[in-house]
Image (tube, rainbow, N blue to C red):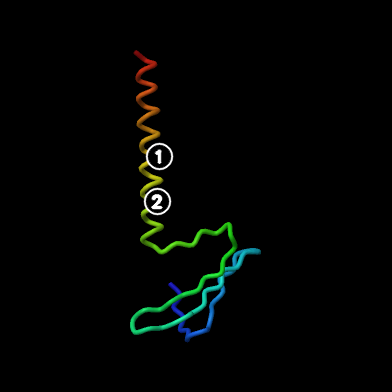
Amino acid sequence: MLVLSRQKDQSIVIKDGDDAIEITIVDIRGDKVRLGINAPREISVHRKEVYEAIQKEKEAEMDARTDQRSRSVEDLER
């Protein structure tokens, strides 16, 4: 993990090919840091707990589809 120190109104840039994500320290209040994130529209930006919830939901949908396909195959075999 790369660890960087930044102060309010300072930024870092993450670049991959033609895409760049800029993260700016907007405000610091006590133990909370507010970040501004400028990213291309095709790149999703989520808090980690939201991202993990989305992934769990996708996994549940895939499991449901797999179960449904298995039941359909079993029905055809009868």
Q: Is residue 56 above or below residue 70?
A: below
Disc number at residue 62?
A: 1
Q: Quadrant of residue 47?
A: bottom left
Q: Quadrant of residue 61?
A: top left
Q: Quadrant of the C terminus?
A: top left
Whole-percent x and y of residue 23?
52, 74
Whole-percent x and y of residue 41?
58, 60
Crowd around label 1: few <14 · some 14–19 · many ≥20 (10 Å): few
Three-letter amino acid code at disc 1?
Answer: Met
Q: Quadrant of the N terminus?
A: bottom left
Q: Earlier in the sequence, mark 2 or mark 1?
A: 2
Q: Nearer the viewer, residue 7 or 36?
A: 36
Residue displayed at 40% across by 34% down:
65
Residue displayed at 44% across by 78% down:
3
Query: Left or right: 22 with respect to 50?
Result: right
Q: Is residue 51 above or below residue 35?
A: above
Secondary structure found at label 2: helix
CA separation in Å, label 2 and label 1: 11 Å
Secondary structure found at label 1: helix
Three-letter amino acid code at disc 2?
Answer: Gln
Q: Is residue 37 above or below residue 71?
A: below
Residue displayed at 54% across by 79% down:
11
Q: Residue furthest right?
A: 18
Whole-percent x and y of residue 52?
37, 56
